[in-house]
């Protein structure tokens, strides 16, 4: 099996590229590097297998994006579903913690919205969270 070689992709904070397009672009880039003539020996075997660490600085989310060859040879079953329903194989999502924090932010906002005035034995203007 060929050695695994990492590339890096960073989405700038001022970029307007959509997340799906960034992932598709990265997948195409690692596949192009994978299939380059310079990445094959005299017998046509791959010298390296490629993947990229993709980091979106706008959201702090990260993915590992593997070439189709690396996905197959390394039995990577992870995938990414685009907004249009297209499935891209060989994508490992690394930012589940960030997603959980975003969910907590929404829940906290909901709880804040549920604050109402309820009389108390000591103070009739006590705010109670339900």
Image (cartoon, helix red, strand yellow):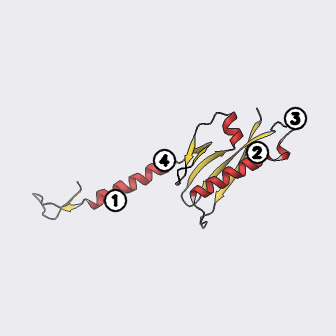
Name the front one of labels 3 and 1.
3
Dot 2 falls on a residue whose secondary structure is helix
Marked residue nearer the N-terminal end (3 or 2): 2
Residue drawn at the location 57% of the way across and 61% of the way down: 18
Q: Earlier in the sequence, mark 4 or mark 2?
A: 2
Cβ–Cβ below 8 Å for labels 3 and 1? no
Query: Observer-nearest residue: 35 or 3?
Result: 35
Q: As displayed, is residue 79 above or below residue 129?
A: above
Residue that badge 1 annotates: 109
Q: Nearer the viewer, residue 39 or 63?
A: 39
- Do the CB atoms of the residues marked 2 and 1 lie less than 8 Å apart? no
Q: What residue did someone put label 4 on?
A: 97
Query: Separation of disc 3 and disc 2 at Cα?
Result: 15 Å
**Distance of mark 2 from mark 1, alpha carbons?**
46 Å
- Mark 4 or 3: in front is 3
Could you give the CA–CA distance between mark 3 and mark 1, rounded to whole angstroms? 61 Å
Q: Earlier in the sequence, mark 4 or mark 1?
A: 4
Residue hosting label 2: 34
Identify the image quadrant of the N terminus: top right
The residue depicted at 71 percent of the width and 39 percent of the height is 69
């Amino acid at each position: 099996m060929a050695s695994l070689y990492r590339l890096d992709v960073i989405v700038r904070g001022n970029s307007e590229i959509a997340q799906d397009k960034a992932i598709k672009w990265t997948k195409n880039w690692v596949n192009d590097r994978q299939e380059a003539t310079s990445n094959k020996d005299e017998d046509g075997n791959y010298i390296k297998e490629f993947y990229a660490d993709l980091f979106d600085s706008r959201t702090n989310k990260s993915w590992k994006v593997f070439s189709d060859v690396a996905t197959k040879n390394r039995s990577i079953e992870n995938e990414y579903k685009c907004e249009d329903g297209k499935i891209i194989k060989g994508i490992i999502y690394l930012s589940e913690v960030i997603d959980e924090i975003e969910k907590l932010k929404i829940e906290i906002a909901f709880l804040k919205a549920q604050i109402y005035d309820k009389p108390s034995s000591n103070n009739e203007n006590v705010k109670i969270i339900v």
